[in-house]
Image (tube, rainbow, N blue to C red):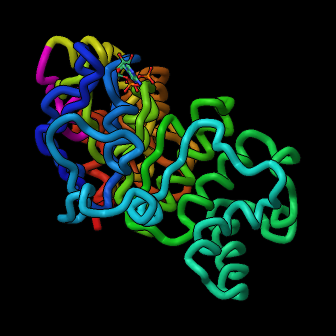
Amino acid sequence: MIELQGLEKRYGAQLAVADLTVTFPAGQITALLGPSGCGKTTTLRMINRLIEPTGGSVRVDGQDVRAVRPEVLRRGIGYVIQRIGLFPHLSVARNIATVPELLGWPRARVRARVDELLDLVGLEPGVYRDKRPAELSGGQAQRVGVARALAADPPVLLMDEPFGALDPIARAALQAKVVEIQRRLHKTVVMVTHDINEALVMADMIALMNAGRLEQFGTPDDLVRRPASAFVAQFMGEDAALEQLGGVLAANVARPGDAAGLPVLPAGADARAALALMLRHGTDAVAVEGGAGVVQFRDLMRDPRASTGVERGA
Ligand SMILES: Nc1ncnc2c1ncn2[C@@H]1O[C@H](COP(=O)(O)OP(=O)(O)OP(=O)(O)O)[C@@H](O)[C@H]1O
């Protein structure tokens, strides 16, 4: 876990981050959310010491980051940024291998690891291993960036607007991929975003910041249905509950029930589509194709994450 205690960053008279005390749980995705300039990136970069705080402390798995040399610290913390900054003259494989090579892994192990990671991020190793970054689409380059950040299997992954430069389709695909990877590997992920939908779709916990301070720390459902302040309610917006349903598979909120005569939703549809189908047909339930069960209107009123029974924690 990552514990911020009274964390502060002051630039002259300006407080970019003020007295931030919060714990990001291990094995979960926490989104740092908030308007432009609220201090998200500054907070993230104080975790891996790209920025040094002017007050307070950061502990990663119990250890104060100031006790570790920055280069050593950063080898144990994956870092993904927007427009990933791959080395243009190196192949995809060499880009991914940067940290393992620094750590002196034997060549065969590095090679096997590169292929394993390409598979993990959904890129065929035989096709992509020897390509140069200039030959990749934005989405592919960003996948390579994620693979590179995971290369030495760090327990912590920091991501700063990692999908910001991607078109909506590549973005949604990579969001899903990162959630899938996180569920499989149980990394502790902290992700900066100003996109509410991205936070609702991906995060287990959201830290909503405003002018350098923490407005609320809670589950997506907490922020949507139990906002701690007028700022939170306004920032999340009136559509937030709908957006939240958009991040959940209808099959995951479905329960066994009598599907006879109900309108049928495609198997991969989300809970928002389930609501739309109910409204269109004037029913209070829909069946999910493929025998996944029935979604009742009241099922949509609960925390969709809680009702899925999907455990995301370590
Ligand atoms: N090197 C710096 N010198 C002076 N002020 C800075 C510096 N870096 C950041 N700031 C200020 O600190 C505040 C927080 O910046 P930060 O980049 O953390 O915000 P952010 O929430 O990540 O914003 P965005 O979403 O626009 O990237 C801003 O007001 C910014 O202008």
| Number of numbered markers | 0
Foreground residue, 290 or 187?
187
- Residue at image x 84%, y 53%? 89
Q: Which quadrant would the N terminus be assigned to in this image?
A: bottom left
Q: State whether residue 253 appears in this view.
A: no
Q: State whether residue 177 appears in this view.
A: yes
- Name the spot of residue 286 as percent of width and height, x first: 43, 39
Foreground residue, 310 or 183?
183
Residue 220 counted in the magenta span:
yes
Q: Indicate whether 170 appears above or below 214.
A: below
Q: Is residue 249 left or right of residue 311?
A: right
Residue 6 sits in which quadrant? top left
Q: Indicate whether 129 appears above or below 49.
A: below
Foreground residue, 294 or 62?
62
Q: Quadrant of ligand 1?
A: top left
Q: Indicate whether 158 appears above or below 210.
A: below
Q: Is residue 99 left or right of residue 53?
A: right
- Residue at image x 66%, y 33%? 166
- Name the spot of residue 100 as percent of width and height, x first: 60, 74
- Name the spot of residue 182 as percent of width and height, x first: 44, 60
Residue 204 counted in the magenta span:
no
- Residue at image x 59%, y 36%? 82
What span is colored magenta in the figure? 216-229
Q: Indicate whether 197 appears above or below 22.
A: above
- Residue at image x 64%, y 69%? 117
Q: Is residue 22 left or right of residue 151?
A: left
Q: Which quadrant would the C terminus be assigned to in this image?
A: bottom left
Foreground residue, 298 or 158?
158
- Name the spot of residue 108 as percent of width and height, x first: 72, 88
